[in-house]
Image: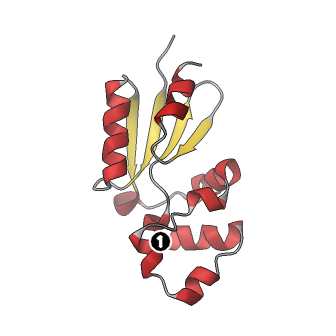
Amino acid sequence: MTTPSVTLYGIAHCDTVKKSRAWLAEHGVAVRFHDFKKVGVPPDHLQRWIDAVGWERLLNRQGTTWRKLDAATQAGVTDAASAAALLQAHASAIRRPVIEWDTGAPAITVGFAPDDWRALLAR
């Protein structure tokens, strides 16, 4: 069985991203890291993530970035298009990490999800 490689999207100083990178390293997964703060969010990837997991899952409503937005901006996020616009402008509002798995059949996971990751590694 070949261990998959992944691209992990997130922010380097995020504790969940750090925990995820450590877990993946412990399980021998080759990780390419894409830092939103340094490189930005690739628009075509953002749409793919929304299509795969839904904008509601991708939007981190518990994070500091979301909480700092004014009520009108928050209320304006009502569908995939408005969420995509907000997430493109405020990458820190994306739930982290987003991982694109190269497991033969593409997969995308959001958040620290070791059970899901184990299942992907078992493919």
User: Total marks drawn?
Assistant: 1
| Residue 79 position in % (x across, y down) | 71, 70
Q: Residues within 10 Å of mark 1 (few under 14, many from 20)?
A: some
Whether residue 74 is situated above or below residue 6 in the rendered picture: below
What residue is shown at x 43% (from left), y 66% (from top)?
92
Name the outermost residue toward the top: 1
Q: Quadrant of residue 57?
A: bottom right
What residue is shown at x 34% (from left), y 39% (from top)?
21
| Residue 33 position in % (x across, y down) | 38, 44
Name the outermost residue toward the left: 13
| Residue 84 position in % (x across, y down) | 62, 67
Mark 1 residue type:
His
- In the rendered view, does 103 fall on the left or right side of 67? right
What residue is shown at x 46% (from left), y 19% (from top)?
3
Residue matched to label 1? 90
Q: Quadrant of residue 18?
A: top left
What residue is shown at x 51% (from left), y 32% (from top)?
115
- In the rendered view, does 64 fall on the left or right side of 81? left
Q: Between residue 113 and residue 54, name the one nearer to us.
A: 113
Q: Secondary structure at mark 1?
A: loop
| Residue 34 position in % (x across, y down) | 40, 49
- Split into 4 quadrants, where in the image is the C terminus? top right
